[in-house]
């Protein structure tokens, strides 16, 4: 089985395990979370102060509301809720983020 296919299967299996009706939290790599540069630029221009507050919160290790992600067909995840937090976490250099997976 190829690496991409293995990754898709792992994403699906992780999603299937977490889709049991309760609020299971998964931890995913931010490198696997897809957000376009255009969306990042738009949100930074519009909501830069809010994103900065989130970034500081991540750097100080504060508890954050988890983001909601949807697996992409070609691997990785799209952000359903929490784009500001995803941008802030990436800016803070956080490698992993807690998330709820939907749409599996």
Image (cartoon, rainbow, N blue to C red):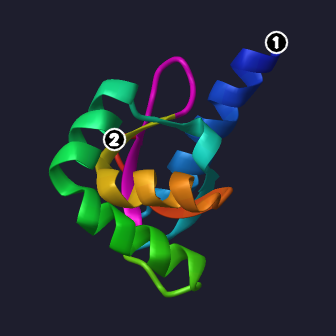
Q: Quadrant of residue 5?
A: top right
Which residue is most to the left?
A: 46
**Cβ–Cβ below 8 Å for labels 1 and 2?**
no
First to last magenta residue range: 66-76
Residue ID at (47%, 76%)? 56
Q: Quadrant of residue 65?
A: bottom left
Label 2 secondary element? loop
Q: Is residue 52 above or below residue 9?
A: below
Q: Nearer the viewer, residue 64 or 55?
A: 55
Q: Is residue 19 magenta?
A: no
Percent across and percent down for residue 22 are 39, 73
Let me know if residue 20 appears in the view. Answer: yes
The residue that mark 2 highlights is 103
Percent across and percent down for residue 91 are 53, 54
Residue ID at (64%, 61%)? 94
The residue that mark 1 highlights is 2
The C terminus is located in which quarter?
top left
Q: Is residue 75 magenta?
A: yes
Q: Is residue 84 above or below residue 98?
A: above
Label 1 secondary element? loop
């Amino acid at each position: 089985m190829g690496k991409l296919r293995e990754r898709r299967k792992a994403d699906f299996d992780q999603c299937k395990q977490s889709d049991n009706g309760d609020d299971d939290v998964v931890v995913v790599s931010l490198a696997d979370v897809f957000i376009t540069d255009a969306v990042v630029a738009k949100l930074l221009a519009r909501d830069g102060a809010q994103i900065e507050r989130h970034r500081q919160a991540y750097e100080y290790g504060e508890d954050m509301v988890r983001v909601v992600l949807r697996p992409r067909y070609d691997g990785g995840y799209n952000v359903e809720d929490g784009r500001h937090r995803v941008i802030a976490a990436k800016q803070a250099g956080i490698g992993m983020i807690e998330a709820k997976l939907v749409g599996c």
